[in-house]
Amino acid sequence: KRVEKHFGEADDISLSRGLVNTVVGECEKKYIGIGERTRRLVKDVYEGSVEVEWRDEDVVAAFRR
């Protein structure tokens, strides 16, 4: 919602829609990367004794809403 609020109010509706889609897509990629890094840290440092409560599919689903 915040992305739409800040980037979705351009005079050209197709431009603003494209910008919103680009920003949301980049945010999604960043969160997936964070999840991968977190899982790697859990595996290497905590030897799996800690669980990561989200999957990449959860991130993708959250950004599709």
Image (cartoon, rainbow, N blue to C red):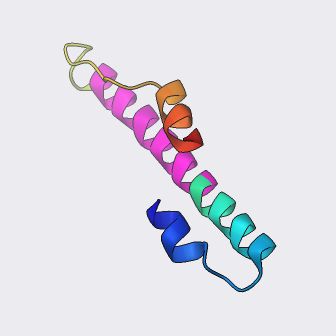
**Span colored in magenta:** 25-44
Residue 11 relative to residue 57: left or right: right
Residue 4 % position (x, y): 55, 66
Residue 56 % position (x, y): 51, 29
Which one is nearer the viewer's eye here, 47 or 30? 30
Residue 17 % position (x, y): 71, 66
Residue 24 drawn above or below residue 8: above
Which one is nearer the viewer's eye here, 33 or 45? 33
**Magenta residue check for 60:** no
Which one is nearer the viewer's eye here, 65 or 43? 65
Residue at the far bottom in the pictured view: 11
Residue 49 relative to residue 16: left or right: left
Which residue corresponds to the image point at 67% horizontal and 61% vertical from the top-left? 22
User: Dominant secondary structure of the magenta stretch?
Assistant: helix
Residue 53 % position (x, y): 31, 23
Which residue corresponds to the image point at 49% horizontal and 38% vertical from the top-left? 62
Which residue corresponds to the image point at 51% horizontal and 65% vertical from the top-left? 3
| Residue 38, quarter of picture | top left
| Residue 19, quarter of picture | bottom right
